[in-house]
Image (tube, grey):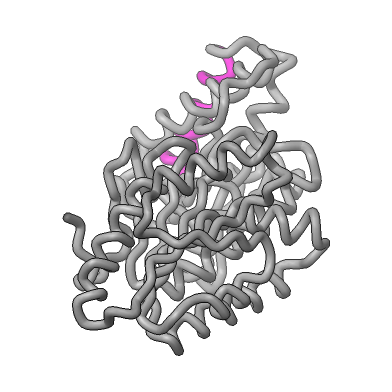
Amino acid sequence: MQLIIGGAYSGKRKYVRDRYLNYHLISAYNHDSIDEALSINKPVVVLEGFEQWIQEELSRKGSKEIRDLFAGYLHELLKMEREENIQVYLLMLEIGRGIVPVEERDRKWRDITGWVQQDAQNLCESVYYSWHGLVKKMK
Amino acid sequence: MITFISGGARSGKSTLAEHLAEGMYHQTKKEHPNSQLCYIATAKRSDFTGDERIDLHIQQRGKVWETIEEPYILPSVFTYVSEHSIILLDCLTVWTSNMMFSRNLGIRDMEDMLLNFLKKAADRQCSVFIVSNDVNEGMPSKCRNVQAYTFSLEAIHKLVIAASSSVIQTVAGIPIWWKRDRRLVLQ
C-alpha cells in the first residue's frame, strides 16, 4: 500500500496517472463510498478524499470511534492488497498546516484527519509528499 | 537562471531569497558592472494602512537594492532593468490575487504573462528569484473564490517550478532543496 500526501492541487493524482494507464478511482469528491473499494478486484485501486469521508462521520461518532473506523478500513485495504495481489494507493490531503480552526467541529475534523494519515503512514510501505507538482519519497 | 522559493508563513523564504540574490549580485557585478539588484514588489500601496510598512521594507533592504513596484504587468519591469541584473519577485501569491480579483484575469492570461516575463529575463541574461507561499496545506475552504485562487496559484507554481533550475522549500529558515543548480551558492 502506498500513501501520497500533499496540499490541494499539489499533484497527488498526477503521480498515479503518470505511472498507470488504468486504475480504478474511488473518490469522495465524486460521492463514492469507501466501502466500494473493498469489493473491487482491479489491479490498481486509488482512494482519495479521506477528509471528506471523515467529515461525514463527525456528527455521528466520537473522535476515537472515527479513528478506529478508518484504521479498520486501512487494515482491510492492506489485507485485500495482499490477498488479491492488487496495488492500493491512498491519496490524502494535507490540511494541518493552516491556522487552528475556530469551530470545535473543524478542529475535531482536522485532528482526526491527521491521525488517520499517521495510521495510514504506519501501514504503507512507501510514503510520498507532493508539493507544487513535485514528489519526494518520505518513507 | 530561475530559482523558486516557497514555504509557510514566516518560514524565512523572503530572507533566504534576498540572501541568495545578494550573493549572486556581488558575484555578477565583478564581470558585469552595470548589473542591478532589483526587488519587484507586487503589493499595491493601497493594501497597507499608509505607506509606512512599504517604506520600512525598502529601507531595511538597504541601498544596494532598487525597488520596482509592479502589482500587475510583470514584463514591464524590463524598462528599468539592465542586462545581467538579478531580480527578486516577491511574491506570486499577491500577484495572483491582484490579477484574479482586481483585473479578473484567468489562468491562461497569468501563465502567458509569467512566461513572457521569464523569457524577457532570459533574453537579457538576468537571474530571477521568485518567492511564493504554500497556502494549499491548510483546512479546505468552502468559498469558491478561495478554491479557484488555490487552483490557479498551484498551476502557476507548477509552471514556474518547471522553468526553474533551483527549487527550494523553506522550513524555519532552512532550505530544503527540491532542485539544485550548482551555480547557486549559499554563503
Q: Whole-percent x and y of residue A10?
A: 53, 54
Of the pair A2 and B65, the residue shown nearer to us? B65
Of the pair A104 and B7, the residue shown nearer to us? B7
Q: From where the camera sits, is residue A133 visible? A: no
* Residue at image location 50% in from the left, 69% down from the top: B160
Q: Whole-percent x and y of residue B112?
A: 65, 78
**Magenta span of residues:** A65-85
Q: Is residue B75 left or right of residue A135?
A: right
Of the pair A114 and B44, the residue shown nearer to us? B44
* Residue at image location 58% in from the left, 19% down from the top: A66
- How many marks the image carries: the answer is 0
Q: From where the camera sits, is residue B76 visible? A: yes
Q: Is residue B164 left or right of residue A20?
A: left
Q: Whole-percent x and y of residue B84?
A: 35, 81
Main secondary structure found in the magenta portion = helix
* Residue at image location 38% in from the left, 75% down from the top: B85
- In this rendering, the answer to whether B76 lies above or below A104 is below
Where is residue A56, by image quadrant? top right
Where is residue A50, by image quadrant? top right
